[in-house]
Amino acid sequence: MKASPRNNSLSLGVFILDYDPMLSTTLILQALISGILASGLYALVSVGLALAIGVIGIVNFAHGELFMVGAFLAYQLFVYFGFDPLVSLLPVALMLFILGIIVYQSSIRFVLKAPELNQMLLTFGVSIILQNLALLIWGGDPRSISQVPYRSFGFQLGDISIGAVPLISFSISVLLVGLLYYLLLKTSLGKAMRAVAQNRTGAALVGLEVNRIYLIAFGLSAALAGLGGVMIAVIQSPSPTVGFAFTLKAFAIVVLAGLGNIRGILWASLLVALAESLVATLVPDGDAIRNAVFFAIIFAVLIFRSRREGGM
Amino acid sequence: MKQGFWRDLFLALLIFIALAFLPTGLRQFFGKASVSYVSLAIAALSLATLALSWDILVRTGQLSLAHAAFYGAGAYSTAILLKLTSAPLWLGTLVAGLVAVLLALALGWVTLRLHGIYFAIATLSFSEVLKAVVHKLPTAIAGGAAGINVEPLFRPTFIAGQMERWEIAYLRNERYFYVFLALLALAVILSLIIQHSRLRYAFSALRTNEAVARVMGIQPARYKLLAFVMSSWVVGMLGAVSAHRLGSVNPDESFSVFVTVLALVTPIFGGLYSTLGPIIGALGLSSVEELLKRSFSDGYLIGYGIVLVLSVLFMPKGILGLFTQFRKHLNKEEPSS
């Protein structure tokens, strides 16, 4: 998510549309494309969180930390074995699946019926533990897998440049989210998950092993977060504290989509990623308010929806 | 007001009077080291005030993640007021409380129809947006990313020959201690008023089931906004006083999401929906953190995380819940008494 070239000839918060029509059209197109490409990663991370919230009903504040662990495992695999991040995807997903299972078995399964606040406090504790373990192991400096050969690749479409890394990350994210949809809609495991999400007791009555399905769902959720982490390790230079911001953003996207609405996540991710990218490009000094735009949209949508539908 | 109110108020008064002697006592016993002990006490008081004010709001079922916004708004109000005008120092804190209340009224009004996680995310978003707005205010007013310096509330004068160097720091801390103590007292009084009046029933009815509360004749808007006002008033002033003590404000620290996180973790740890719970939680958490900090310099926060996880697993109703459980247990043992 590199900052796109920004026009600095205007110092006020005015859109540059009236400045140079050719240049601004290119800029807008460029911003649109970067936004679309960035939305893939958001969708991937949010879909994992939505799985934990939707199927298990757990408000997982440690989701971003699982994401961060994925990033640092990919980094470590690269440093030790020279694994290309593309190769690391599978081992990291497996390791995160196992980590998810450990977290679930050691703590989360005991608070399934606890009040939401307690679940939040518990997962917040897990997130503090993971974040500070990572700080102990890797220190606070940002790390990045910058030596991949295709990092500087890209191609030009007229005046618009598309980097290989964002494109690959977008494609993989879309593929993974597609696979998850397939899993949920077409396989028996997916049907079981949806059944458990709809009615825990009913699912148990027809003979589904609810606890095992929760376990798998949480492992899957962690694995999806980890896969997103592998990509962020190439796109940005994450530090062990990167997770919390992503937890907040993923939460916001899930809520924007509406709880339990996994398809809505695609639209929500696209909306916020596009808005972020457009503002970062078109508004002078827009990078600084990127996050604000993200949250302003979510605030506005929530308020608007609550007024229209008469309560949520 | 019921009888219980005056009893609790009296008890609280006794405790606060006892606490007022804490700095002097520490000074007598520890001498120079008392400076850092009083600092610790201030941190605990500040955490308790933050936690109690958050608890007041959550009693209506509004799980707010906007406390950083009120805290930061308070800090910036006093900083900007004192920078642009020559208002007296104490006025800044009062204005800070007022600004926080106005913000809370606006936020509370637009989020009236949101509940649960939707409300939480909306308030969090509000806080993040406000942070960015402060960031982008003209530098001449709010100082941008670098922030503004804030004058300290107290400047004890050094009298050569009559006192030692550390005593200056002690005197400064001692005065801040009383200010923070007063803020906590305000929060306690507000909380006791709620707990011992009809407000308590209105709040818990709203929390348990808003539709039913409405049928019983409780106007959600009135009580939710009232809780917002009380809570933000205290937090706004807390932010202002903390800004004076720290000496500066900047968007990332004054509006840090960790203010919000502390505001919610502490009451859950101590025991929700009570006056004592958040205070016990603040005492517990700040001692745990300090102990861990002294035992492990690196990664002590891991221990903090473990304490949180264990406390949810083994005392889901907080420390206070543990006490009530224990008392019930005792009563069962001796049914005759």
Image (tube, coloured by chain):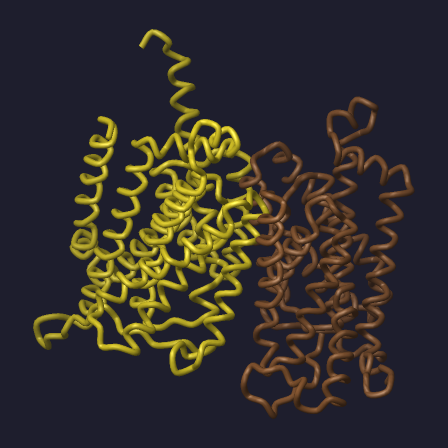
Task: Identify which residue, B146 or B157, lies in the foreground.
Answer: B146
Residue shown at 74%/46% (left/top)? A261
Task: Identify which residue, B199 or B328, lies in the foreground.
Answer: B199
The number of numbered discs placed on residues in the rendered structure image is 0
Q: Left or right: where does residue B14 sit relative to residue A159?
A: left
Q: Left or right: where does residue B64 sit relative to residue B169?
A: right
Chain B colour in the picture = yellow
Residue sticking out furthest to the top: B336
Q: Quadrant of the C terminus of chain B?
A: top left
Residue shown at 75%/58% (left/top)? A267
Residue shown at 48%/33% (left/top)? B317
Q: Left or right: where does residue A1 sit relative to residue B317?
A: right
**Rendering quarter of residue A120:** top right
Residue sticking out furthest to the left: B162
Q: Quadrant of the N terminus of chain B?
A: top left
Q: Which chain is brown?
A: A
